[in-house]
Structure formats: C-alpha cells, structure tokens
Image (cartoon, grey):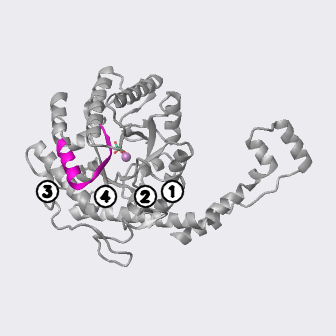
Amino acid sequence: MNKFFPKIKKIKYEGPNSKNPLAFKHYNPGQKIMGKTMAQHLRFAVCFWHTFKGTGADPFGSPTILRNYNRAKNPMQVAEDTMYAAFEFFTKIGVEFWCFHDRDIAPEADNLAETNKRLDKIAALAKKLQSDTGVKLIWGTSNLFSHRRFMAGASTNPSPEVFAYAACQIKKAMEITKQLGGLGYTFWGGREGYETLLNTDMGRELDHLAAFLHMAVDYKKKIRFKGQLYIEPKPKEPTKHQYDSDAGNCFAFLQKYDLLDHFKLNIEANHATLAGHTFQHELQFCIDNGIFGSVDANRGDLMLGWDTDQFPTDIYDTTLAMYTILKGGGFKTGGLNFDAKVRRQSIDPQDLFYAHIGAMDAFARGLKNAAKMIKDKRIERLVQKRYAGWDSPLGRKIEKGKIGFTELEKHILKNGEPKLQSSKQELLENILNEYI
Ligand code: XUL
Ligand code: CO
C-alpha cells in the first residue's frame, strides 16, 4: 500500500542521534523494558476521526487541510479511499491498533437502514485490511453528538424517540466492533449534559443514562461481545456541564447504578486538565479504585480553556503517566490512543507523520524514564518513609479499626504534640528532573 502517502516509507527506529525527521529517536518497538517490549507496554493506537477526517475547520473558518483521499465526488468512494489511506498510515507509522466512531468511517444516509448498509460495506473493507496488515481494533465507538437530532443529548435527551435512535446506533456500532475483533467499546458523553438547569431534569436524565448503559451491557452479553466497555470522562465541551465530568464522578455514577462490574475508564489527558486535575491524578484515581482501562493520549494548552487535543510532547507528562501506569500494573485491554489533531496550519500529509512520531517518541521516553524511576526506588523510598508512622503500633491499630476516639485521646494526652516531618517536595522534584 503506497497510494495515499507515496513520499513516505515505513518509519524506522534510528536512535537518539538521528536527525531524520521521519524516524523514531526513542521508540524502538522490540526493545525490552521490565520484561516486555516497548510495543507491548505502550500499545499505540491511531484514531480515525482526527487523523483522517480532521480538516482544520474551526468556529472561525472552513477547512484548511485537503487530503488526496477526500477528493472523490461520491461520499462512499471517499469512505473507501480514506480507509485505504488509514491502513497505509497505520502500517507506515507502525502502530498495532486503531479506533473509530461509526460516522467517521461511513457517511450517514437518509434513513437508518441505508446508513447501516453503508457501515456494513465499509466495515467489511476494514476487516479485510485488518487481516492484510495485522492492525487490530482497540475500541469502537458511536458518534451521538454531531447530527442535529442529538442537539439535546442522546440517552439523556428529553425525548424517548431520540433515546431510541441512539440505542439503534450503539447496537449497530457494537455489532461491527465485534465483527472487527475490537478489544473494547467506548462511551464518551458527547452531548450528555446540560446548558442550563432551568430546562433540565438532571436526576431523570441520569437515570436514563444508566438505563441506556444497562441496555448496552445486556446487548453485549446477547451478541457475546467480549470487549471491555469504557466510559471517557470530560467535564465540559460541547455542553457547559457534561455528566461524566471526571473519574471520581464516573466512579460514583457506576456505583450508584450498579454498573461498576461492567465498565472501566478511558482517561484523556486534556479532559483531565479541563476538569482541573492533572492527567496523573486521573490515572492514579482509576488505578486506586480498580477502574483503569485505557488512555486517550493528548495534551491541552495551559493558556486556553478548551479541548485543543494537541499531540503529547511534554516529557514530564509522559514520564509521570507511564510511572503511574507501570506501577499500577500496565495496560490490559487498553492502550495509548492518540486522540489528537494536527493544527489548522499543519496542512501537509507529512505533518500527520511528524505528529505521531513525536508523540510515540515522547511516550517511549516516558516509559524509559519511568522504568528507571521504578528500578531505582528513590522516589518510592521517600514516600514509604513519609508514611512509616502507619507501621507503628498506633498506625496499625487505626488502619485495622481497632481503636477509637477515646483511646486516641489517651494516646495524645500521654505522648504530647506530634513530631512533624518535611514533605520533601523540592527534593522529589529535583530527583524527577534527574530522569527527564
Ligand atoms: C471528545 C473525545 C472523543 C472521544 C470518542 O473530546 O475525546 O473523541 O474520545 O468519542
Ligand atoms: Co477522547
């Protein structure tokens, strides 16, 4: 396959001294780190929507990015060409996985039956290209937010007719995800949220969202789809308040509605920062609560308050993310999916390659740094020391629930003022810098 990116050959690892912009400097897929190859640790995925359907359009201007696979007059021809271009890209960049929304891969027709026929046709092509190339589907998802029928949400819409339409879409998208051997299925809230509480019955909408997800769990069982279901938190955009606002909120929702056994979280870096958290915080929260699933790897811009979906290049971020993920046991069904788009002015096909090469190298460096940090245990030891008091007789009794307020009062009256210790933040930051 050399039709849509004819100037680009397969991207190779050339090492840190290479000056070739179309080579990896750090991502060496077969290199072993802590017993697994880099490829096995990082599990990179390319997303169909930004990478192949992104046009650079923004609220102030029309598309700037014109692709050779987007030229045909017939929209189904465009869909086929784009699928070929995508698999050419996946193999040249050397990722193991891809992912898509239903409406990215096949254009919507005038009615559901015809739309589904179009999806079947393109899914069959994707299946063939998967078996030709060995590239696998990390997850599928459904676009329940672009069409005007979903302007007031999908499963949280005030109309049950829209709820029903959304259900049809998920049903079909789950079926094709299963056909393509997808390892998961992601629910991102889209327009599940509100613009004003003046017109919104929030309690009822959340009950409907839960009912919808229960139906998805039931249908998954019915068709024997074995993939992992994910929820992807995001606090705002497109709505002013998105219901799945952050990991903590999703965890509470899943517990309240008895869905915790069926879902894990897909954490997106830029969504974490929009929620006022660090990427590392959201990862750690999921790991601590057994709900870590997958990652949408990108980055925001600290000067802007919206979802810029930039490619991840910040080595601090990738190092801390990989440190947290490795300590949490690594990926199982998920991976690092680049839910990121090139900028409006990055109009060359090569820019797509530079963007992914940079992001893959940034995570490879993060992985190497994190593995050294884990091996050296310098940070871990300082944390252990900080909590050492909990291994004393007093600490143990509290943790085991063997002591109450009366005994604690006796203890303090006898022993007096607690001894304080430095938290050593600056020292820890310096140690981290030694690895960057
Ligand atoms: C939107 C977003 C989506 C999901 C899939 O901010 O991240 O692309 O990842 O619907
Ligand atoms: Co995402």
Q: Which mark is residue 326?
A: 1
Kindly report which numbered mark, 3 or 1, lies closer to the viewer in this rendering: 1
Q: In the picture, which quadrant includes the N terminus?
A: bottom left
Percent x, y for residue 163?
32, 25
- Using a 10 Å C-alpha cutoff, classify the residue at mark 4 as few (fewer than 14 neighbours), some (14 to 19) or many (20 or more): many
Say whether mark 3 is within 8 Å of ligand 1: no
- Using a 10 Å C-alpha cutoff, classify the residue at mark 1 as few (fewer than 14 neighbours), some (14 to 19) or many (20 or more): some
Give how far apart the Cα atoms at labels 4 and 2 are. 12 Å
**Residue 188 visible in the displayed image:** yes
Instruction: Say whether residue 394 is left or right of residue 113.
Output: right
**Residue 64 visible in the displayed image:** no
> Mark 2 highlights which residue?
41
Percent x, y for residue 2?
15, 62
Label 2 element class: helix
Q: Earlier in the sequence, mark 3 or mark 2?
A: 2
Give how far apart the Cα atoms at labels 3 and 2 are. 34 Å
Amino acid of disc 2: His
> Mark 4 highlights which residue?
95
Amino acid of disc 3: Asn
Give how far apart the Cα atoms at labels 1 and 4 are. 20 Å
- Using a 10 Å C-alpha cutoff, classify the residue at mark 3 as few (fewer than 14 neighbours), some (14 to 19) or many (20 or more): some
Kindly check if marks 4 and 3 are in contact, taking CB atoms under 8 A apart as contact: no
Residue 131 drawn in magenta? yes
Percent x, y for residue 110?
15, 30
> Mark 3 highlights which residue?
68
Kindly check if marks 2 and 1 are in contact, taking CB atoms under 8 A apart as contact: yes
Amino acid of disc 4: Val
Instruction: Say whether residue 16 is left or right of residue 377.
Output: left
* Residue nearer the viewer, 133 or 208: 133
Q: Earlier in the sequence, mark 2 or mark 1?
A: 2
Q: Earlier in the sequence, mark 3 or mark 1?
A: 3
